[in-house]
Image: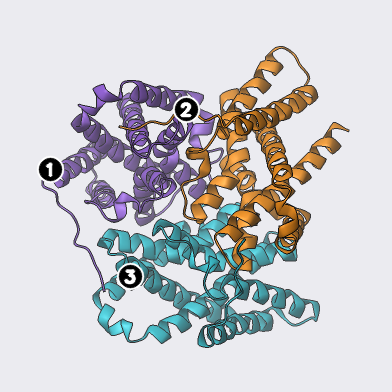
Chain colours: A orange, B cyan, C purple
Amino acid sequence: MQINTMETIETLGTVAFAISGTFAAMQRRLDPFGVLIIAFVTSIGGGTVRDLLVGDTPVAWMRDVNYCLLILLTSLAAIFFKTHIKKFKVTLFLFDSLGLGLFTMLGIQKGITFGLSPGICVALGTITGCFGGVIRDTLLNTIPVIFHKEIYATACILGGVLFFLLKYFKVTDGASTIIVIAFIFILRVIVVRFKLALPKFGY
Amino acid sequence: MQINTMETIETLGTVAFAISGTFAAMQRRLDPFGVLIIAFVTSIGGGTVRDLLVGDTPVAWMRDVNYCLLILLTSLAAIFFKTHIKKFKVTLFLFDSLGLGLFTMLGIQKGITFGLSPGICVALGTITGCFGGVIRDTLLNTIPVIFHKEIYATACILGGVLFFLLKYFKVTDGASTIIVIAFIFILRVIVVRFKLALPKFGY
Amino acid sequence: MQINTMETIETLGTVAFAISGTFAAMQRRLDPFGVLIIAFVTSIGGGTVRDLLVGDTPVAWMRDVNYCLLILLTSLAAIFFKTHIKKFKVTLFLFDSLGLGLFTMLGIQKGITFGLSPGICVALGTITGCFGGVIRDTLLNTIPVIFHKEIYATACILGGVLFFLLKYFKVTDGASTIIVIAFIFILRVIVVRFKLALPKFGY
């Protein structure tokens, strides 16, 4: 049952990332193909980098064509219904944060499966959650937002640390997973709602 | 004999991509090393990403030093004879389109070898054909041309779909390969000749 | 004892690259997380690309959490003591050049371990030495310095060629390693001291 829950949220997260990628690309006035590509890399970038780093190839999206179809359909829907979806900017943000939490957990779980140490698992979870956005922004020729906007990857790191704290206190994996996803989600909402950001540096 | 034909066209495609990379880098006034690197990534980028995604490592160019030598010599020739080659801009474009077709087919074939589903094979073919240019443009700090110029990756996708349609109708692999390469090549020529492009989007 | 020497220099090189990444990111006024990420990719980028290309996964930094801790502590130290360290710009440059030499050698050694041909080993060494900086600059949205500044990757290539020349003349691997690191280091110092650069190209 827990697996079904995670699959459901993964689907929602994939959908949310595909929509966010579609909108980012349309803002830059790319052609339809470019929009689809950006939607695709935003959705699968994190998982792809995760699978490459641990050597779990062919990477996940190549083994399941349904995953690609979901992104394609989501992106096409976002293109055609853009005026309608734009009104749900808040809904989108919520889905994006939910996806961030889940993808972080998926990365941590894969790290554990490959026998990596907790610190590395947290890094892998963070990469899984954030890298789609990093590749998207790099391709769109802007400094990736996670480097100069409100707390984003930091939420993944804190969530990952929380997961291993809960593990240390013998909380079950299933419960920890739900708690961490909720934690990352709520932290993101609080941060964006109150415009919190890490202080910047300069010479 | 068909394998020899493909090897010949692969060589031509590699040469064409190396020349296009060399010229793109020289336009940005890079030093000779930078020019060689850009020529190299333009030629091998697509195949490298393909091999990484399916887990076929060490990647292709690391297993055959002749491939690297070919790129090096082509790039050096393009640097020294640039005024002469510039007159053959059309020839270059034709080779580039031929290379695009062949590299797309090589990607599709590798996908089939690794037992991936047709949709994924088409994606892999498209990545193999286009990614060299994407990496080149990202390193040169411009939005990759495939995202805002005339139909490029779309030609690979249509070519890939055509390949599996031909397969469905029991056309032999050899014939399909030739047809698809010709299709991508001719489509590119028509698109560029008549300045066709996918419509753009914006909010 | 030679292994201990290399481990020592590797540690120093990692430290130097982490500091250079930290400073580059602070110059762009990133938030602390962004600074840490840039410090991290500058330190591990080259080795990660190397391990991905040859298929030695999980990549090196995922197998040794101490490596990550070293980068984290170095970057934090650089952030807090930045005014102090800035006076040691020359020291930094020297460590950076030393790191370049060592990482190049580590790449070459891994290439030999995987049975690749000498030319490919030199390329792998160059990638190991330079790619951290390339990824850093790409993420910071500038043309990677190795493409338009003084001789950098060229030093790695010349060092790599020197290594195989020494091997050809039966010099022991241990001696060759020290000589090549010293060669790359000294070449960098001479180049920067006398502002040497490869000539640029343009149409």
Place of residue A30 in the rendered image (x, y in percent of width and height, measured from the top left): 57, 65
| Badge 3 amino acid | Ser
Q: Which quadrant of the figure contains the N terminus of chain C?
A: top left
> Label 2 vs label 1: CA separation?
33 Å
Return the mark for residue C193. Answer: 1
Question: Residue type at mark 2?
Answer: Cys
Binning the other alpha carbons within 10 Å of mark 1 as few (below 14), some (14 to 19) or many (20 upward) gives few
Q: Is there CB contact under 8 Å for labels 3 and 1?
A: no
Mark linked to residue C68 = 2
- Chain letter, disc 1 residue: C
Label 3, on which residue?
A: B75
Q: Nearer the viewer, residue A7 or C128?
A: A7
Q: Is residue B132 left or right of residue C159?
A: right
Q: Secondary structure at mark 3?
A: helix
**Residue C102's image quarter?**
top left
Q: Residue at x 54, y 66 (%)?
A: B147
Front in this rendered view, residue C155 or B201: B201
Residues flagged by tags 2 and 3 on a common chain: no
Q: CA distance from mark 2 to mark 3?
A: 39 Å
**Which mark lies nearer to you, 3 or 1?**
1
Q: Does the rendering let one see residue B153? A: yes
- Element assignment for label 1: helix
Q: Quadrant where the C terminus of chain C lies?
A: bottom left
Measure how far apart labels 3 and 1 are at the Cα level: 30 Å
Residue A67: x %, y % from top left: 75, 53
